[in-house]
Amino acid sequence: MKEIFVRYPQPVDADDAQLCLAIDETPERDGGGSAGEDVIRTMREYQRTENPVYLLMAFIIATDAELYPPQGILRWLRDGFREWVLDVGDISLERALDLSGRGRHGKAIREWFSGLMWEDRMIEVYRLQQAFRISLQDASGIVGSKRIAGEFATMRDFAEPDADTIYDRAKRTGHKPPKSIRDRVDAMVDEMSDTDRRALLHSYPVHTWQHIPKLKKYLG
């Protein structure tokens, strides 16, 4: 079956008042490819993973191109909005749309966010190792302290890898960011003053590093 996209209504005197577009007639996106192709590709990712974040992404792609989102997305939004309204706000809209990380698709959502954040965490670990000459395990413990658990934690908090996860995965994968990033971090560390190092360390909870001998001088 051939997919057809419907774009937002145009003025009747517009040069091109066509409302129904084939995929290859939809607007081109930055980086190449049409918006229609990207919407279909993203929807297929949703079908493969059942991760509703892909529905949000497809909605953004379609509406940026002034196309109506696929019916599957509109039904998902409708059902979530209906549940939230009928429950008179007793549940969050995030939960009504199954985006909270606790629902049926929670695992898929957490894994998706964790993948996005993984490189950032590895850069943090590497920066701490280089700035303070501490072990991978100690640096992982400090970075892993960012994880927050609790009823009102955000999705980003749920996706944050904990210290053990960071350490185990870093050990298994070689724990170093790409060379281009390492070079940039090394140059930044070389220019850090003692005050800069202290500020970096105190951006993490003190209890996660106060027991490390090399860092005790920064307690004061």
Image: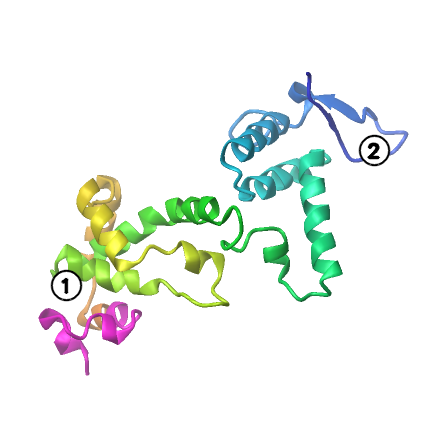
Image quarter hosting the C terminus = bottom left
Residue placed under numbered mark 1 in the picture: 132
Q: Position of residue 22 (x, y in %)?
A: 70, 20
The range drawn in magenta is 199-220
SS assignment at label 2: loop
The residue most toward the right is 12
Amino acid on which the number 2 mark rests in the picture: Gln
Nearest the eye: 184 or 122: 122
Q: Position of residue 139 (x, y in %)?
A: 20, 60
Amino acid on which the number 1 mark rests in the picture: Phe
User: With 89 as the anchor, is 204 left or right in this view?
Assistant: left
SS assignment at label 1: helix
Residue in the picture at 37% in, 56% down: 160
Within the image, what quadrant is residue 124 found in? bottom left
Nearest the eye: 211 or 50: 50
Give the label on residue 10, or none: 2
